[in-house]
Image: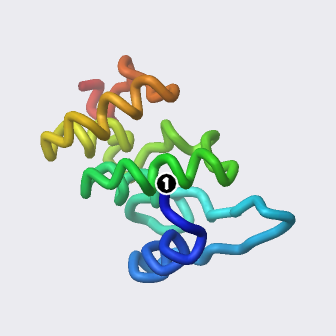
Amino acid sequence: MLSDEEAAMTLDAWGFDDLRSKGKVFIAPVDLFKESGPWHRACGQGNTGMCRWLKARGAADMINDKDQLGWTPLYYALSQKHEKTATWMIANGADVTANDNRGG
């Protein structure tokens, strides 16, 4: 798993504010960014280590967040052929039945 320092640097590079409180990381939901969230970025890059870090730091409730098109982080991993990351996401609660904004 990534260290807190490595994860903070990655989140910063992605443009996400990473606010720490009592060891839990709070990251603004997807709709505040008008793009995609940290789960989407991690999955799109096949960064399973960041996925583990996000879950361990209390962001598991965002694992199925959708971007503006209704795409989930799992979709990002699959569309970029990141099999290891997609498998990890499914094993950790990603919704395999989610539809995008067009119903697909």
Q: Which residue is drawn at 76% across and 59% down?
A: 24
Residue 57, compared with residue 6, is above or below; it is above
- Give the quarter of the image for residue 74: top left
Q: What residue type is labelled 1?
A: Met
Most foreground residue, 101 or 36: 36
Q: Provide residue 2's location: percent of width, then percent of height.
A: 49, 62
Q: Which residue is drawn at 66% across and 54% down?
A: 57
Q: Provide residue 95's location: percent of width, then percent of height.
A: 44, 24
Most foreground residue, 29 or 63: 63
62 horizontally vs 25: left or right: left
19 horizontally vs 86: left or right: right
Q: Residue at x 31, y 40 (%)?
A: 85
26 horizontally vs 4: left or right: right
- Give the quarter of the image for residue 35: bottom left
Q: Residue furthest right?
A: 22
Q: Provide residue 86's location: percent of width, then percent of height.
A: 30, 34
* The C terminus - image quarter: top left
Q: Mark 1 points at which residue?
A: 1
- Give the quarter of the image for residue 5: bottom right
Q: Provide residue 97's location: percent of width, then percent of height.
A: 37, 17
82 horizontally vs 59: left or right: left
Q: What element carries label 1?
A: loop
Q: Residue at x 26, y 51 (%)?
A: 46
Q: Residue furthest top?
A: 97
